[in-house]
Amino acid sequence: MLCGLVAVGFPTEAAAKEVSAEKWVKSVCTSLDDWAESLAGAQDDPDLSATDLADRKDALVGYLEEVTDATNTLLRRLKKAGTPDVDDGKAVAGTFRKGFTQARDTFADAADQAAGLAIDDEAQFEEDVTDLREAINEGAEAISETFDDADQKYEVQELDDAFDEEPACSGIA
């Protein structure tokens, strides 16, 4: 059932290639590390803290669009990583894609909302930005629940070991 839900939005012409747990984990962690770097780089826009509301709005929309694009790139890389050749490997890989599809959708929705922010009242703008942050945080909680549920449902020691042993995973919580 989960696999059917996860497949939405992904081509199904060919089954994902099966790879070793170690190869899959390395690919996933490398992709996640690159994604995190992209997100951090997107935050470096000095206009995100500009006093001019139009500049801040533009920077916020640009940031959220950049984060959405980075998450789309991550999703492509997760699909390309294949499926770990372990019990429940297809479901585990699907859960990763599902979680980050949720993240992408959260960022895309936030970008759309940010594009509609009014800039004629600073107090209202600040309140709207706070609401936007709260919506992103709620989205992050839903994503976290997806991973927590999967962690409880799929006990795959081979993957746990591979995550523990892969140096590319060391910076990932």
Image: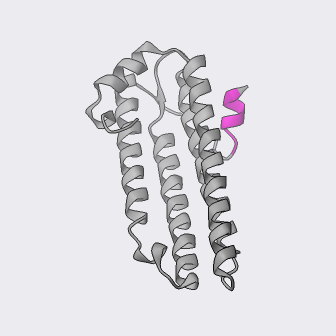
Colour scheme of the rendered structure: one colour
Q: Is residue 27 left or right of residue 167?
A: right
Q: Quadrant of the C terminus?
A: top left
Residue 147 visible in rendering: yes
Residue 131 sits in which quadrant? bottom right
Span colored in magenta: 2-8
Question: In the figure, is residue 154 to the left or right of 43?
Answer: right
User: Where residue 120 sits: x, y (%)?
Assistant: 68, 86
What residue is at 67 percent from the left and 67 percent from the top?
127
Magenta segment includes 57 = no
Q: Position of residue 30 (x, y in %)?
A: 35, 42
Q: Is residue 172 above or below residue 102?
A: above
State whether residue 91 appears in this view. Answer: no
Q: Which one is in front, 119 or 87?
A: 119
Residue nearer the viewer, 23 or 15: 23
Give the residue furthest to the left.
167
Q: On the rendered image, what quadrant is the N terminus found in?
A: top right
Asked if residue 7 is among those painted magenta in the image, a careful observer would answer yes
Q: Main secondary structure of the magenta part?
A: helix
Q: Quadrant of residue 100?
A: top right
Q: Is residue 154 above or below residue 163?
A: above
The percent position of residue 129, horizontal first and vertical second, equals 62, 66
Q: Is residue 135 above or below residue 160?
A: below
Tell me what residue is drawn at x 52 percent, y 83 percent.
Answer: 55
Residue at image coords 55%, 59%: 68
Question: As drawn, is 157 to the left or to the right of 154?
Answer: left
Residue 50 percent location from the top left of the image: 47, 79
